[in-house]
């Protein structure tokens, strides 16, 4: 019989933020995490500037913030819109404007954040 280890208990809390103003308190931690992950096009100023001035019509903000207690350990910067046939889809912020925007996580938290 092969024993499969139990999934580790996690204290991570994911929140979907749909209001740009609600992201302001998280901007410094978001930017520090993007810097630590070498994701210069994922900083909040760049992506939220795009959101304010170039987002698609009828798009809805959908940024996922993942916290371990008070520490921000993951960000999935995105929005939702309707694609072909009316299907709702999640897309990275600045889609079709810049490349290399993707979800990112603190070192050692990648697997947990992905779940």
Image (tube, rainbow, N blue to C red):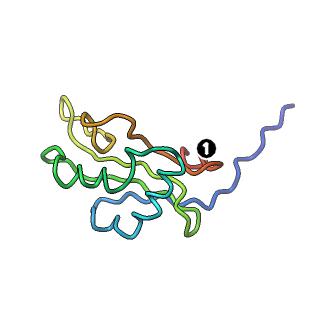
- Look at 19% across and 29% down and name the residue there: 84
Q: Is residue 62 above or below residue 72?
A: above
Q: How many marks can you see?
A: 1
Is disc 1 surrounded by few (<14), some (14 to 19) or many (20+) residues within 10 Å?
few
Picture coordinates of residue 50, whole percent (x, y):
23, 49
**Quarter-of-image position of residue 97:** top left
- What is the quadrant of residue 20 in the picture? bottom left
Residue assigned mark 1: 111
**The C terminus - image quarter:** top right
Q: Is residue 41 left or right of residue 80?
A: right
Residue at the image point whose x is 31% and y is 51% from the top: 46
20 to the left or right of 39: left
The percent coordinates of residue 38 (x first, y second) are 50, 44
Name the residue: 57% across, 59% down: 12
Q: Nearer the viewer, residue 78 or 86?
A: 78
Dividing the picture into quadrants, the one containing residue 25 is bottom left
* Quarter that holds the N terminus: top right
- Residue 114 in percent (x, y) is at 54, 44
Q: Position of residue 101 (x, y in %)?
A: 38, 40
**Residue 53 in the figure: left or right of residue 16:** left
Residue reaching furthest left? Answer: 57
Q: Left or right of 110: which side holds 77?
A: left
Secondary element at image label 1: helix
Residue ID at (49%, 51%): 35
Q: Nearer the viewer, residue 86 or 111?
A: 111
């Amino acid at each position: 019989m092969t024993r499969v280890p139990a999934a580790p208990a996690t204290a991570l809390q994911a929140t979907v933020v749909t209001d740009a103003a609600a992201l302001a308190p998280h901007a410094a931690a978001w930017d520090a995490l993007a810097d630590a992950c070498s994701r210069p096009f994922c900083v909040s100023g760049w992506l939220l500037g795009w959101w304010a001035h170039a987002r698609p019509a009828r798009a809805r903000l959908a940024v996922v913030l993942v916290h371990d207690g008070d520490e921000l350990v993951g960000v999935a910067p995105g929005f939702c819109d309707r694609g072909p046939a009316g299907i709702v889809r999640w897309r990275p912020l600045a889609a079709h404007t810049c490349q290399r925007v993707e979800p990112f996580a603190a070192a050692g938290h990648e697997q947990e954040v992905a779940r």
